[in-house]
Image (cartoon, grey):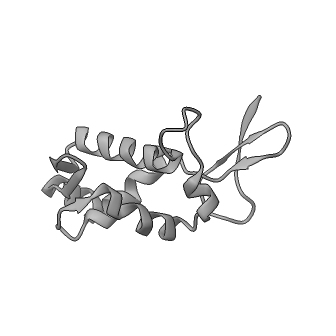
Amino acid sequence: MYALARPDASDKVPVLQNCVGWAQMIPHYQSLMLPLLQIAADGQEHRIRDVIDPLTKKLGLSQADVEEMLPSGRQPIFNNRVHWAKTYLAQAKLLEITRRAHICITPRGHDVLAEAP
């Protein structure tokens, strides 16, 4: 059984805790959307692999959090969630997927950031 809980005295995203008290500090893809869009705001093309490290630093994640794998063991959970955030931002036309695993912010993405989300 899992329940959502907020970290104490922090503005970080909710964590998922099970009954034993183990906490998973990896943000959900929705929480990664704004930081990903902010990184892309420079207007340059970014390779998704290259934004992972700046995102982890921006969110204050530990190396253990970043290295935690999906149950399949094929991909780190954090990387998977960054890719989902990229996918949904592209569907909203805030990012453009310029080629495989590469993104660039769109004019609509700049407009959203200008509105101070």
The residue closer to the viewer here, 35 or 84, is: 84
In this orientation, does residue 116 appear?
Answer: no
Compared to residue 26, the image places residue 113 above or below, namely below
Q: Which residue is drawn at the image coordinates 53% and 65% (left, top)?
A: 59
- Residue 50 at x, y percent in the picture: 33, 64
Compared to residue 18, the image places residue 58 above or below, namely below
Image check: 108 left or right of 88? Answer: left
Q: Quadrant of residue 21?
A: top right
Image check: 93 left or right of 48? Answer: left
In this orientation, does residue 2 appear?
Answer: yes
Compared to residue 100, the image places residue 48 above or below, namely below
Q: Residue furthest front?
A: 74
Q: Which residue is drawn at the image coordinates 51% and 47% (left, top)?
A: 76
Q: Residue furthest top?
A: 1
Q: Quadrant of residue 54?
A: bottom left
The residue closer to the viewer here, 105 or 108, is: 105
| Figure quadrant of the N terminus | top right
Q: Which residue is drawn at the image coordinates 48% and 38% (left, top)?
A: 74
The residue closer to the viewer here, 59 or 50, is: 50
Q: Quadrant of residue 18?
A: top right
| Figure quadrant of the C terminus | bottom left
- Residue 109 at x, y percent in the picture: 22, 55
Compared to residue 34, the image places residue 10 above or below, namely below
- Residue 42 at x, y percent in the picture: 22, 71
- Residue 70 at x, y percent in the picture: 55, 38
Image check: 96 left or right of 20? Answer: left
Q: Which residue is drawn at the image coordinates 36% and 45% (left, top)?
A: 83
Image check: 21 left or right of 85? Answer: right
